[in-house]
């Protein structure tokens, strides 16, 4: 009798284990089905975004998922270089960065039978910020280039520190490319971990110039941006070597970016490796579409295709 009871318990345990295995298989098949069922308005996708674009992409992602309840977009904020590496490794299916892929990067994706889709979604700018008490209230492109190369010293004879959000960020890549820096150029930089940390560092150090994505200070209706602007000063830039008037200097606002008066402009791209028409395609279409472009404009950036209207205001003179 005891032996039969023992066998009965073993059978129950065996049935239980089989049941658990059956449930696990159902779960895996369900997950696979969900991936296969990814559509432009439903499913799951991981996206790597350069941290410079965080304010815009936070808003755009929230709005997109609010409109499409079955869509889940998971954003990872990375340096630009690491975002591209993630795309090449198929860790993510989409990136948002400040450049197109190189020929070598596109060739690598084609080897993996990936379909590369590149869409310009906004025109952005790199903004320079400084401590409110800094003597550098305005700069020419030439003088800033000299600062970048370490040719300009402060009153104590020390080079001015350039502060970036990351050693591999789009901001640093842009400055290197703009001024055609070589390994022989001496550039003294301090790398933080985010654009917010750049702002915090500059707010506490007079001998520093921060280089950030303009999106972090462009939306004047955003309470966080208002706090940042109380802590630091955005530097207007002149392209003339010898400017003679305050009107020769331009702030990185929508009008000056649109008219190409502010020099440190750059494009913003959404790039996907998705085959077929899935959630990546839907998210990119949203970003490029009317609703997405309105968010771009609201954030203080320049839409890639929408028509915008400017209201002329009086400019404050530069002290």
Image (cartoon, grey):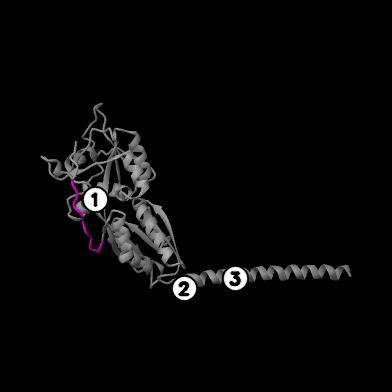
Q: Residue at x 41, y 59 (%)?
A: 62
- Magenta region, mostly helix, strand or loop? loop
CB under 8 Å between discs 1 and 3: no
In primary-sequence order, the first of circles 2 and 3 is 3
**Residue 101, horizontal then vertical, whole percent:** 30, 60
Residue 247 % position (x, y): 14, 44
Tell me residue 270's x, y (percent).
Answer: 33, 61
**What is the count of numbered marks?**
3
Q: Quadrant of residue 111?
A: bottom left
C-alpha separation, residue under disc 2 versus residue under disc 3: 18 Å
Report whether residue 281 is seen.
yes
Secondary structure of the residue carrying tag 2 is loop
- The earlier-in-sequence mark between 2 and 1 is 2
Residue located 24% across and 27% down the image: 157
Mark sitting on residue 25: 3
Q: Which residues are magenta?
A: 304-314
Res. 284 image quadrant: bottom left
- Label 1 or label 3, whichever comes before in sequence order: 3
Q: Is residue 112 visible?
A: no
**2 or 1: mark nearer the eye:** 1
Mark 3 is surrounded, within 10 Å at the Cα level, by few (under 14), some (14 to 19) or many (20 or more) other residues, namely few
Q: Which residue is mark 2?
A: 37
| Rendered-image quadrant of the N terminus | bottom right
Question: Disc 1 marks which residue?
Answer: 253
As drawn, the residue found furthest toward the right would be 1
Q: Badge 2: how crowded within 10 Å, few (<14), some, or many (20+)? A: some
Q: Residues within 10 Å of mark 1 (few under 14, many from 20)?
A: many
Mark 2 or mark 3, whichever is nearer to me: 2
Residue beneath the point at 39% across and 57% down: 48
Assess whether residue 74 is covered by the magenta stretch: no
- In this view of the protein, which residue sits in the foreground, 289 or 124? 289
Q: CA distance from mark 2 to mark 1?
A: 42 Å
């Amino acid at each position: 009798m005891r032996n039969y009871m023992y066998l009965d318990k073993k059978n129950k345990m065996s049935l239980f284990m089989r049941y658990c295995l059956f449930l696990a298989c159902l779960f895996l098949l369900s997950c696979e089905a969900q991936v296969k069922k990814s559509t432009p308005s439903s499913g799951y996708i991981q996206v790597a975004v350069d941290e410079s674009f965080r304010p815009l992409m936070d808003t755009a992602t929230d709005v997109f998922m609010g409109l499409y309840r079955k869509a889940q977009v998971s954003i990872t904020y990375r340096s630009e270089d690491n975002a591209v590496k993630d795309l090449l490794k198929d860790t993510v299916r989409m990136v948002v960065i400040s450049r197109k892929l190189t020929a070598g990067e596109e060739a690598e994706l084609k080897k993996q039978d990936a379909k590369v889709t590149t869409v310009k979604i906004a025109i952005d700018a790199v903004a320079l910020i400084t401590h409110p008490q800094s003597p550098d209230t305005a700069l020419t492109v030439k003088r800033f280039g000299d600062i970048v190369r370490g040719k300009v010293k402060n009153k104590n004879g020390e080079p001015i520190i350039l502060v970036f959000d990351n050693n591999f960020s789009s901001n640093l890549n842009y400055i290197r490319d703009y001024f055609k820096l070589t390994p022989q150029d001496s550039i003294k930089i301090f790398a933080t971990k985010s654009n917010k940390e750049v702002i915090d560092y500059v707010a506490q150090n007079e001998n520093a110039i921060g280089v950030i994505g303009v999106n972090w200070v462009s939306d004047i209706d955003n309470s966080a941006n208002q706090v940042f602007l109380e802590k630091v000063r955005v530097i207007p830039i002149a392209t003339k070597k010898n400017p003679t008037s305050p009107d020769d200097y331009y702030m990185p606002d929508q009008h000056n970016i649109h008219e190409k008066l502010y020099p440190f402009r750059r494009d913003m791209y959404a790039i996907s490796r998705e085959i077929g028409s899935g959630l990546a395609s839907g998210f990119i279409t949203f970003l490029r579409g009317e609703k997405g472009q309105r968010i771009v404009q609201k954030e203080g950036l320049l839409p890639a295709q929408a028509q915008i209207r400017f209201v002329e205001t009086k400019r404050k003179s530069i002290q």
